[in-house]
């Protein structure tokens, strides 16, 4: 049940990121404090939930970029150099790939996503 709750959080935050970043060019995104800050907030939610996925569950989802999410989680709050590049990469690549793989895993391993005890 823990996995299913975490995956639901990841998918919900990821969907919000995709909606906020849809059809936005990089310069426009970086210039928009409101959109950028909300995208970063949602990415931190995703990264925090991803960080809580148990190690044994991670082994069942090898295609997810576990290390990339950890790196992003550490870079965002500190506003490290290159954070804009990391956020843009996550918006255009990491988030969509994560959502795609979760959808595939949901079809192939539905027991990981079931809200059962």
Image (cartoon, rainbow, N blue to C red):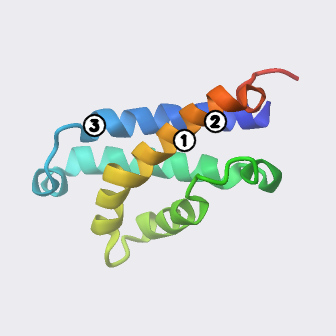
Count of numbered circles in the view: 3
Residue contact at pointers 2 and 1, CB within 8 angstroms: yes
Distance (Cα) linking label 3 and label 2: 25 Å
Q: Quadrant of the C terminus?
A: top right
- Place residue 77 in its image quadrant: bottom left
- Of circles 3 and 1, the one toward us is 1
Residue at the (82%, 52%) spot, across then down: 56
Relative to 2, residue 110 above or below: above
Q: Is residue 52 left or right of residue 26?
A: right
Distance (Cα) linking label 2 and label 1: 6 Å
Q: Is residue 93 left or right of residue 9?
A: left
- Place residue 23 in its image quadrant: top left
Residue at the (36%, 40%) spot, across then down: 17
Relative to 72, residue 23 above or below: above
Nearest the eye: 22 or 33: 22
Instruction: Specify the farthest residue to the bottom.
Output: 81
Q: Secondary structure at mark 3?
A: helix
Q: Earlier in the sequence, mark 3 or mark 2?
A: 3
Residue 9: tell me if it is visible: no
Instruction: Specify the farthest residue to the right.
Output: 117
Kindly identify which residue carries mark 1: 101
Residue contact at pointers 3 and 1, CB within 8 angstroms: no
Kindly identify which residue carries mark 3: 20
Kindly identify which residue carries mark 2: 105
Distance (Cα) linking label 3 and label 1: 20 Å
Q: Earlier in the sequence, mark 3 or mark 1?
A: 3
| Residue 53 percent across, percent down from the top left | 71, 49
Mark 2 residue crowding within 10 angstroms, few (<14) / some (14–19) / many (20+): some
Residue at the (33%, 44%) spot, across then down: 38
Residue 51: tell me if it is visible: yes
- Of circles 3 and 2, the one toward us is 2
Nearest the eye: 63 or 114: 63
């Amino acid at each position: 049940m823990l996995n299913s709750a975490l995956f639901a959080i990841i998918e919900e935050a990821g969907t919000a990121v995709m909606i906020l970043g849809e059809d936005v060019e990089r310069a426009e995104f970086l210039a928009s404090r409101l959109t950028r800050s909300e995208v970063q907030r949602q990415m931190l939610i995703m990264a925090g939930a991803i960080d809580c996925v148990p190690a044994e569950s991670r082994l069942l989802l090898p295609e997810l970029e576990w290390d990339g999410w950890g790196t992003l989680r550490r870079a965002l709050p500190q506003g490290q150099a290159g954070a804009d590049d990391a956020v843009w990469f996550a918006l255009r690549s990491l988030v969509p790939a994560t959502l795609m793989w979760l959808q595939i895993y949901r079809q192939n391993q539905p027991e990981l996503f079931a809200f059962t005890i």
